[in-house]
Amino acid sequence: MNDQNMTPQNMLAAQKEFFLSGQTKPLKFRIKQLKKLKSALIKNEEYFYEAIYKDFGKSKFETYTTELSPVYSELNLSIKKLSQWVKPEKKKTNLANLPGKSYIIPEPLGSVFVIGAWNYPYQLSLIPLISAIAAGNTVVLKPSELSFNASSIIAKILNRVFIPEIIRVIVGGVKETKELLDLNFDKIFFTGSVPVGKIVYQAAAKHLTPVTLELGGKSPTFVLADAKIKMTAKRIVWGKFLNAGQTCVATDYILVDKKIEKKLLEEIKKQISIQFPNFENIPENYVQIINERNFDRLLNLTDTEKVYVGGTYDKAKRMIHPTVLHNITFEDTAMNDEIFGPILPVIAYDNLDEAIHEVKKRPKPLALYIFSSHKKSIKKIHKEISFGGGAVNDTIMHLTNHNLSFGGTGSSGIGNYHGYAGFQAFSHFKSILKKPFWFEPKLKYAPYNDKKLKRLKRLMG
Ligand code: NAD
């Protein structure tokens, strides 16, 4: 197909035709595409570093650890495990169907639409794409227009390496996304904000298209009285200010036991100066805010009277110093919406139950972290608060374990991915009962009578 001047409609039609031809289904085909993607990424790695640096001054080190390494790891896992994932899975057969056999066959959904966010433009677009290809689908990918350079390099390389019937990357914004959302895809996988998640969900409903929505929200970090303060501060500061706080699972705010508030704040301040000694001098340790709109939004959240550390910025470079706000309550402006930047409000609590209750009253967080060794309290928080996923005595690192599926709950998202969960997100699991011809109980057939009913009740009961 000549992909010049292709309309979204005929692009999807071509993908659907290709899918219906059955060519994406063999294991060999899927592995071949995954290997092709891996070698294209390796060959063009320098371009990926350059592009993201143009978007928000991200260093090579951080681009590798937070973007390319998770993508390679997902590719390697899928290539290694796919032959197991595609196998039909045997299930037990109930008495009424013996001597039959039961099993479940995974099958691809068809032609899917992946919409990415800008904050980790490579992994948030490519990991769902890898899962979709592994599951045997064709993919239209629309990365975010805000990370324009990163999205353009994805498009340039993938559109050169793959034919558009298998993978097509569209660089575009709201208008292009809306046009694509009007089409009848077999699945939509969206990463982004809650308000746009609702737009996507509504558009999907028109065609009864299944969705995975990877959204955001305010993710709390509890620091209990027994926490080892130094390590707690070190891990919180790392996870919060990585990517200048533009991470969906970063600590949004801290809830700390009042008894240790002062010590924790002092240690966080110390950690900021250790981990970000010369933040003004990009590129090594810190990144820029993605655009002016977000920069201004973040400054408006910073109540200057409540700044404990930071609060300074460089508008020309779109840099905001790691900032900690103290004496915060749930009524402060910083507590209204997801922060998604390097501002960290700290709320001190007297009573853990009350703090838990405050979190429970609000939308379900995408992530929740607890720093403590007190088993009873950890269990209590886990039992009482519903949230996507999280960690005890660390932040963010749960994402690096592909054995842990990743996703939100309530307004933080619908569905999961990463590793096998990603394969599941892009598959339908077809349930099959297979019966032999040689046996059939008379019991299920008319004429019915009391004797038969009694026997049936005995068998079923
Ligand atoms: P966003 O919702 O503004 O944009 C996401 C995608 O939607 C982009 O590709 C964009 O082009 C498209 N889009 C924007 N407005 C649209 C509209 N009106 N109609 C159709 N499409 C539209 O989100 P963002 O600013 O890119 O990302 C930040 C948000 O994403 C934060 O809330 C963050 O928590 C969340 N996020 C979640 C995850 C996760 O895995 N759960 C990961 C990263 C970011």
Image: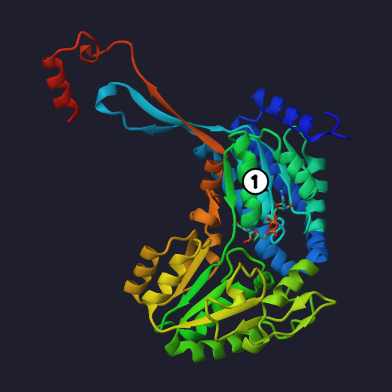
Q: Is residue 259 left or right of residue 439?
A: right
Mark 1 closeness class: few <14, some 14–19, many ≥20 residues within 10 Å:
many
Q: Can residue 317 be seen at all in this image of the molecule?
A: yes
Ligand 1 appears in which quadrant? Answer: bottom right
Seen in the picture, residue 453 relative to 199 is either above or below; the reply is above
Q: Can residue 191 be seen at all in this image of the molecule?
A: no
Answer with the quarter of the image where residue 29 lies.
top right
Whether ligand 1 has any atom under 8 Å from the Cβ at mark 1 is answered as yes
Residue under label 1, please give it: 200
In the image, 123 versus 188, the foreground residue is 188
Secondary element type, mark 1:
helix
Q: Is residue 50 left or right of residue 204?
A: right
Residue at position x 88%, y 35% in the image: 5
Could you say where residue 451 lies in the image, as x and y percent from the top left? 11, 15
Answer with the quarter of the image where residue 59 lies.
bottom right
Could you say where residue 338 lies in the image, as x and y percent from the top left? 61, 67
Could you say where residue 1 lies in the image, as x and y percent from the top left? 83, 28
Residue at position x 65%, y 48% in the image: 199
Answer with the quarter of the image where residue 181 lies.
top right
Residue type (three-letter) at the residue carrying disc 1: Val
Seen in the picture, residue 200 relative to 46 is either above or below; the reply is above
Disc count in the image? 1
Query: Which residue extends farthest top?
Result: 447
Seen in the picture, residue 231 relative to 457 is either above or below; the reply is below
